[in-house]
Image (cartoon, helix red, strand yellow):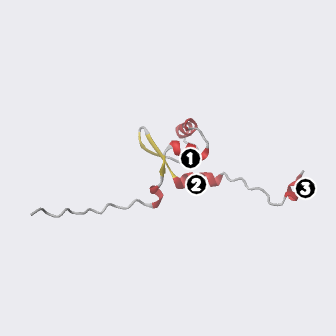
Amino acid sequence: MASAAKLVKMPSVSAPMAALLSAENVAGITGLSIETLAQWRSQRKGIPFIKISRNCVRYRQADLEAWLTERIVRVEADPSIAERRL
């Protein structure tokens, strides 16, 4: 009689690590070029990244969203306020 296969439960992926984006994905979302992202990585500036191996870099979606949030420019809702500053 054949033995029953043993099921092994794999650990679940935590939420912050669930969405890893490639440089191509990030370039498509932000409008930045892949080359700009590569330069920023070499200069250790810009969007935080994960270096998985020598040729494999990923960005966490949460880090990208935080980086984008930091760059939101608020505008005044009342145009008359802007006119008074001129």
The percent coordinates of residue 31 (x first, y second) are 61, 43
Above/below status of 86 relative to 77: above
User: Which residue is tagged 1?
Assistant: 47
Task: Give the mark, 3 or 2, whose residue is nearer the N terminus.
Answer: 2
Q: Which residue is mark 3?
A: 84
Q: Residue at x 62, y 52 (%)?
A: 68
Kindly report which numbered mark, 2 or 1, lies closer to the viewer in this rendering. Answer: 2
**Is 27 placed above or below 16 here?**
above
Residue at 41% from the left image edge and 38% from the top image edge: 54
Looking at the image, the residue that sits furthest to the front is: 1
On screen, 66 above or below 38?
below
User: Counting residues from the N terminus, which is met first, the one under dot 2 or under dot 1?
Assistant: 1
Q: Amino acid at mark 2?
A: Glu
Looking at the image, tell me whether mark 1 or mark 3 is earlier in sequence order: 1
Q: Is residue 10 left or right of residue 49?
A: left
Within 10 angstroms of label 1, few (less than 14), some, or many (20 or more) residues? some
